[in-house]
Image (cartoon, rainbow, N blue to C red):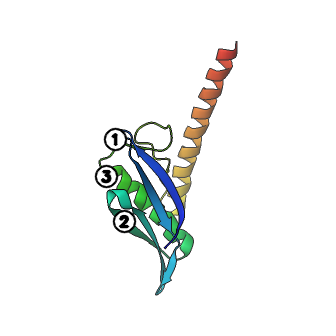
């Protein structure tokens, strides 16, 4: 089976590269299943959804959680140790009002961070 997406991660302590891979979602009975795998760490699992996109999104979230729990100091390119570049997703199991509240908080924090970086950059130019 050929992966549809993969991300190389580096173990900051050993220098070893591992790959998190996602495979094409397949229809099984009434739902869809998307397999993920980190062969080098013996991590494998499945995301299940009512359609292929939901199965993929859930697989990505489950892979992120498994990598955070694996006990290795992984990083994506030159990011900080522990930053694997897979953002946490807002669960759709909470009601719509709660999703909107969480998304607004995330957006506000990103804007606050961006504005602070911009102010810092402008102050260096003076």
For the residues labelled 1 and 2, the Cα–Cα distance comes to 22 Å
Q: Looking at this view, name the residue that lies furthest to the left.
A: 71
Compared to 68, does 81 lie above or below? above
Residue 52 seen anywhere in this rendered image of the structure: yes
Mark earlier in primary sequence (3, 1): 1
Q: Which numbered disc covers residue 41? A: none
Q: Is residue 92 left or right of residue 41?
A: right
**Residue 84: x %, y % from top left:** 46, 47
Q: Residue at x 50, y 54 (%)?
A: 7
Q: Residue at x 60, y 27 (%)?
A: 116
**Residue 88: x %, y % from top left:** 47, 52
Q: Looking at this view, name the residue that lies furthest to the top.
A: 126
Mark earlier in primary sequence (2, 3): 2
Label 1's element? loop
Disc 2 + disc 3, Cβ < 8 Å: no
Q: Label 1: which residue?
A: 14
Disc 3 + disc 1, Cβ < 8 Å: no
- Which callout, 1 or 2, points to the residue nearer the camera? 1
Q: Is residue 65 left or right of residue 94?
A: left
For the residues labelled 2 and 3, the Cα–Cα distance comes to 12 Å
Q: Which numbered disc covers residue 44? A: 2
**Residue 48: x %, y % from top left:** 44, 73
Label 2's element? strand
Compared to 4, does 12 lie above or below? above
Classify mark 2: residues with Cα within 10 Å, few (<14), some (14-19) or many (20+): some
Q: Residue at x 65, y 22 (%)?
A: 121
Mark earlier in primary sequence (1, 2): 1
- In the depicted view, which residue is nearer to us: 8 or 87? 8
Q: Residue at x 38, y 46 (%)?
A: 16
Q: Label 3: which residue?
A: 70
């Amino acid at each position: 089976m050929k992966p549809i997406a993969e991300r190389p991660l580096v173990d900051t302590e050993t220098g070893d590269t591992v790959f998190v891979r996602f495979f094409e979602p397949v229809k099984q009975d009434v739902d869809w299943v998307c397999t993920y795998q980190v062969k080098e760490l013996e991590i494998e699992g499945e995301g299940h959804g009512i359609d292929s996109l939901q199965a993929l999104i859930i697989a990505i979230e489950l892979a992120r959680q498994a990598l955070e729990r694996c006990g290795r100091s992984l990083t994506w390119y030159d990011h900080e140790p522990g930053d694997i570049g897979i953002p946490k997703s807002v669960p759709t199991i909470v009601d719509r009002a709660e999703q909107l509240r969480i998304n607004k908080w995330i957006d506000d924090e990103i804007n606050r961070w961006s504005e602070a970086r911009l102010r810092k950059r402008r102050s260096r130019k003076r």
